[in-house]
Amino acid sequence: MLDSPASTPRGRAEHGGARVVAAVLLLADAGIHAYEVLAADVPFLIGGFLATAVGTTVGALLLLTRGPRLGWVVGGLTALLTTIGYIVTRATPVPTDEDDYGNWLEPLGVCSLVIQGIVVVMAAVALSGPAPLRPGHLVQEVKSVTPGLRPDDPGSGSPNEPPPSP
């Protein structure tokens, strides 16, 4: 379950323990934002909460599959962008959402910020080091988690394979 594509080098991104911890944190953050959707009445907040819930869930699932670097990128960026969104809605009065302005200590928000901060740091560490992030690694991981794109699957469009027969 926690293996990586054979074509990507082993590095910090593949560390199983860190991947599991980050996946649990991302799923907790997804739960917080899914819960917040229920109380939201401003359309852009609902969209933001849903985007965060989906992004953190996808990041967690990728971390637990053959796409660890992709999981770190998706999970880390979602956490970073959500943190920025929290800061913006607290620092400036956003039209139709004046209630959040100045409300820095909202309990679920603070809990989410702590989780997001940990995930962002973990992602930065995982994607640096002896096998840093390269675009080719992400391509290989996309292929490894998307069966129709894997070159060893029938019908993947590989030039060396005949098309599947009906």
Image (cartoon, helix red, strand yellow):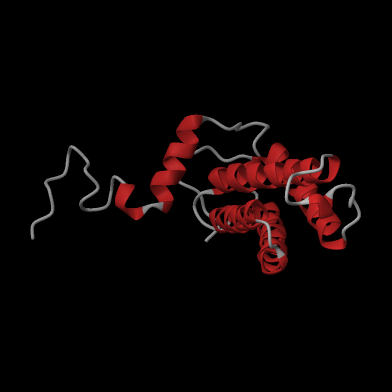
Q: Foreground residue, 66 or 116?
A: 116
Residue shown at 66%/44% (left/top)?
76
Residue shown at 49%/31% (left/top)?
135
Q: Foreground residue, 149 or 8?
A: 149
Decide: is 46 above or below 76: below
Across and down, in percent, residue 141 comes to 46, 44
Across and down, in percent, residue 17 comes to 69, 56
What is the residue that sits farthest to the front in this orientation? 96
Residue shown at 54%/44% (left/top)?
70
Across and down, in percent, residue 14 comes to 60, 47
What is the residue that sits farthest to the left in this orientation? 166
* Residue 7 in view, yes or no: no
Q: In this view, does 65 lie to the left or right of 32?
A: left
Decide: is 115 above or below 139: below
| Quadrant of the image occupied by residue 61 | bottom right
Q: Is residue 165 left or right of residue 78?
A: left
* Residue 104 in view, yes or no: yes
Quarter placement of the C terminus: bottom left
Q: Foreground residue, 24 or 17?
A: 24
Q: How many labels does the image show?
A: 0
Across and down, in percent, residue 92 comes to 82, 39
Q: In this view, does 24 lie to the left or right of 109?
A: left
